[in-house]
């Protein structure tokens, strides 16, 4: 009975969606604002990666909200899981020599790769969110391979708080220097070089630290529970 | 055939969304419901990306001088999806942690057997 009702509901939803989708052409430019970002983005923000300039500069306030959503999800996960956790340290059998050595060799390389991704966010594909996810995958490798190791909660919390603080302080500095929140007040430099685009790389580095430490703390909480 | 050529990405994305909705509505196991949530999330991201696509499009990055901006895809949906993917991972982890607590409390993941969750 429930299955029939669900399928009927899905058929109705699919019908409504197909009616509205038939009006949307595929593969043609649809928004004027996207065209403006492509044509004027390099001149206005100094970042050659237009997606980065949209995320950090044009819609920087939006990104602040999205980072907050991520923060609340990580906090909620910590609260839900640590509500009744027993403090008993379980005995873990150490992994084999090959596995733990391989993890120890790979871990710094993954960290360097993630750092490269978020430092060059305004030049190449990538940025703070992607670099943070790569760094968190490095911590996941350590948790799976060298099972007796743990990241320190204090360092993770420090990186997370610093990332958020840097984002907000740079936004407020833009407000103070005579403009609006998240004004790009630093010199833009020449495009296509590492030190260009003003505040965009700084904010993306802050986002990288914040996302990396938040995802690492999510992994930490989930593994503690198992 | 041209209909399929034009709409295959929309059809694929909304196929994923409908599959995810079906799993969420029908399945009894909470882990399967969360998997359905993940599939739905993927479908929505795919749909947003395909709305911004332009025929013969390239990435909106001026990596070398003299690159033509005529065929660059729309950067706005890409920027939205970029953050939505990371947030989707975090929300999925939050849902899994709630599932862990439900299992500790009720001893089962079957939604039919958890009295407060039945519909």
Image: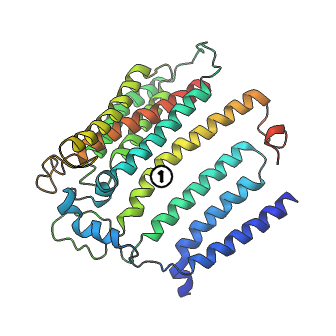
Q: Is residue B91 above or below residue A39?
A: above
Q: On the rendered structure, is B118 left or right of A221?
A: right
For the N terminus of chain A, give its image quadrant.
bottom right
The residue positioned 47% from the left and 24% from the top of the image is A146
Labels in figure, total: 1
The residue positioned 70% from the left and 47% from the top of the image is B32
- The x, y position of residue B73, in whole percent, is 35, 70
Q: How is the image coloured?
A: rainbow
- The x, y position of residue B113, in whole percent, is 85, 39
Q: Is residue A223 above or below residue A57?
A: above
Crowd class of label 1 (few under 14; some 14 to 19; many from 20; radius 10 Å): some
For the C terminus of chain A, give its image quadrant.
top right
Q: Chain of mark 1?
A: B
The residue positioned 27% from the left and 40% from the top of the image is A172
The residue positioned 76% from the left and 66% from the top of the image is A9
SS at badge 1: helix
Q: On the rendered structure, is B83 left or right of B106?
A: left
Residue tagged 1: B84
Q: Is residue A91 above or below residue A135?
A: above
Q: On the rendered structure, is A26 left or right of A130?
A: right
- The x, y position of residue B117, in whole percent, is 79, 42
Q: Quadrant of residue B102?
A: top right
């Amino acid at each position: 009975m429930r299955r029939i009702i669900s399928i009927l509901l899905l058929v109705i939803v699919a019908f409504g969606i197909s009616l509205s989708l038939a009006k949307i052409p595929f593969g043609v430019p649809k928004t004027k604002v996207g065209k403006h970002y492509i044509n004027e983005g390099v001149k206005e923000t100094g970042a050659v990666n237009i997606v980065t300039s949209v995320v950090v500069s044009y819609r920087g306030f939006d990104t602040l909200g999205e980072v907050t959503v991520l923060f609340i999800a990580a906090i909620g996960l910590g609260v839900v899981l640590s509500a009744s956790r027993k403090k008993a340290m379980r005995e873990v059998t150490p992994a084999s020599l090959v596995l733990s050595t391989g993890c120890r060799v790979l871990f710094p390389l993954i960290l360097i790769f993630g750092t490269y991704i978020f430092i060059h966010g305004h030049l190449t594909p990538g940025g703070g969110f992607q670099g943070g996810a790569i760094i968190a995958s490095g911590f996941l490798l350590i948790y799976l391979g060298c099972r007796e190791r743990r990241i320190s909660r204090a360092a993770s919390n420090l990186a997370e708080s610093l990332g958020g603080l840097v984002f907000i302080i740079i936004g407020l500095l833009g407000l103070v220097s005579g403009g609006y929140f998240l004004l790009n007040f630093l010199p833009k430099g020449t495009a296509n070089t590492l030190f260009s685009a003003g505040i965009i790389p700084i904010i993306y580095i802050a986002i990288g630290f914040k996302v990396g430490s938040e995802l690492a703390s999510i992994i930490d909480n989930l593994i503690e529970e198992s | 055939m041209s209909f399929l050529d034009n709409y295959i990405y929309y059809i694929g994305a909304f196929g994923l969304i409908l599959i995810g909705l079906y799993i969420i509505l029908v399945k009894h196991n909470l882990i399967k419901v969360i998997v359905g949530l993940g599939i739905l999330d993927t479908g929505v991201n795919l749909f947003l990306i395909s709305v911004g696509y332009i025929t013969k499009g390239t990435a909106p990055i001026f990596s070398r001088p003299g690159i033509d901006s005529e065929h660059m895809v729309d950067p706005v949906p890409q920027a939205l999806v970029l953050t939505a993917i990371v947030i989707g991972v975090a929300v999925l982890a939050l849902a899994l942690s709630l599932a862990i607590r439900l299992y500790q409390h009720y001893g089962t993941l079957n939604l039919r057997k958890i009295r407060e969750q039945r519909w």
